[in-house]
């Protein structure tokens, strides 16, 4: 893979580029596995970053993503629109169209999107929209606008992906539980893993899933959530131990509503960039049986993103 650039853009100071030359995972993912959370960035020279973005990344192209997919042993990707592209989904659509059917997408749209534009996104392989509530990443969008979008995309059979911090769940609860579609939570709702797993904050998240059968969770991003480490670097195959009990609890309690993704190219990490090969070795720690692994990596993402292939 070639060295990351950013076109004519200047990367955010302190930006960490994705890891070059990842290890071969020791854990072999089951055939047909889906990396259900990853992004493309630009390249900026071809697909400029959005004026309203909160960070400027290094480029991370579709070809680099597809090379990583093959290297890690995955069969497919779900590419999630990154906030640095705002509601300009061109880089995402370009990646989907060049994936030979091996990628589906989650877009970001505004209220002004036309039905024809939604249909074009659908034809390219988009199956969801992302609503982001993380304040360092996006400006506030009124909830009535989001609910209107949710109502429109529900008719296409799409779902809503939500990204928020654990402390904000109480305030967002009524909105989330009123959404008319399947709802997929990014990165387990970002629990504070220094708090007890059976404390009120994580319990609220579990209750959110328990009481609402339409809510799914990505058990991804231990590299963001971990405080103790050790990082997935230098051959470490037992990384981010403080995140394991949280993710494993979600996988074991809701085995049919969990997804896993690399989160490549890992935007906004501050203290290290994981080796994606070693990150894959996190999976058997949170999904310890072959049955749980197949649901997490194959059955669940296929049901959500390629339902026409699941009978
Ligand atoms: O925590 C983050 O910084 C982050 C950012 C984005 C994005 O900018 O889209 O996506 C993610 O999944 C995570």
Image: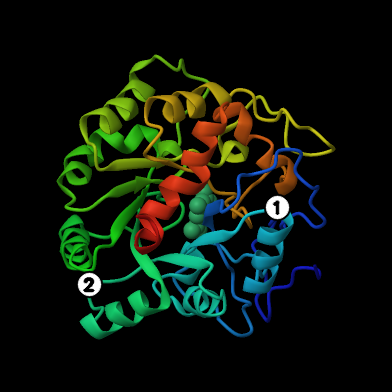
Q: Quadrant of the C terminus?
A: bottom left
The colour scheme used to paint the residues is: rainbow
255 or 15, which is in the foreground?
Answer: 255
Say which quarter of the image contains residue 208: top left
Check if mark 1's residue and mark 2's residue have beta carbons within 8 Å.
Answer: no
Residue 269 screen position, x and y as percent: 63, 48
- Residue 107 percent across, percent down from the top left: 39, 67
Q: Residue 72, labelled with which disc?
A: 1
- Counting from the top left corner in percent of width and height, residue 6 is at 68, 74
Left or right of 117? Residue 12 is right
Q: How many marks?
A: 2
Task: State the residue position of label 2.
Answer: 111
* Residue neighbourhood size for the residue with mark 2, other residues' Cα within 10 Å, grouped as few (<14), some (14–19), many (≥20): few
**Mark 1 residue element:** helix
Q: Is residue 71 above or below residue 62?
A: above
Q: What percent of the width, then of the height, locates residue 271?
A: 70, 42
Apparent side of residue 64 relative to residue 221 in the rendered image (left or right): right
Q: If you read the primary sequence from the N terminus, does the residue marked by circle 1 or circle 2 appear first?
A: 1
Residue drawn at x 72%, y 27% is 238
Q: Is residue 67 above or below residue 30?
A: below
């Amino acid at each position: 893979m070639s060295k990351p650039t950013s076109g004519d853009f200047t990367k955010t100071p302190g930006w960490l580029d994705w890891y070059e030359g990842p290890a071969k995972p020791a854990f072999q993912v089951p055939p047909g596995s889906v990396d259900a959370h990853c992004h493309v960035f630009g390249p900026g020279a071809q697909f400029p970053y959005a004026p309203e973005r909160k960070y400027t990344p290094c480029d991370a192209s579709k070809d680099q993503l597809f090379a990583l997919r093959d290297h890690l042993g995955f069969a497919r990707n779900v590419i999630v629109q990154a906030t640095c592209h705002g509601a300009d989904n061109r880089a995402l659509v370009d990646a989907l169209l060049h994936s030979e059917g091996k990628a589906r997408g989650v877009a970001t749209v505004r209220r002004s999107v036309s039905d024809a534009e939604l249909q074009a996104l659908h034809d390219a392989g988009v199956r969801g929209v992302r609503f982001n509530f993380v304040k360092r990443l996006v400006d506030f969008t009124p909830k009535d606008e989001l609910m209107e979008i949710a109502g429109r995309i529900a008719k296409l059979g799409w779902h809503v992906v939500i990204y928020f911090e654990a402390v904000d769940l109480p305030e967002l609860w009524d909105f989330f539980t009123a959404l008319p579609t399947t709802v997929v939570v990014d990165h387990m709702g970002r629990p504070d893993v220094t708090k007890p797993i059976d404390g009120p904050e994580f319990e609220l998240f579990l209750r959110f899933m328990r009481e609402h059968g339409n809510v799914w969770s990505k058990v991804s991003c231990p590299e963001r959530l971990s405080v103790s480490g050790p990082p997935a670097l230098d051959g470490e195959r037992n990384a981010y131990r403080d995140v394991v009990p949280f993710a494993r609890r979600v996988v074991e309690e809701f085995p049919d509503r969990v997804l896993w993704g690399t989160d490549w190219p890992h935007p906004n990490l501050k203290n290290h960039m994981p080796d994606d090969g070693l990150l894959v070795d996190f999976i058997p720690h949170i999904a310890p049986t072959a049955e749980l692994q197949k649901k997490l990596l194959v059955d669940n993402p296929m049901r959500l993103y390629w339902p026409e292939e699941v009978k």
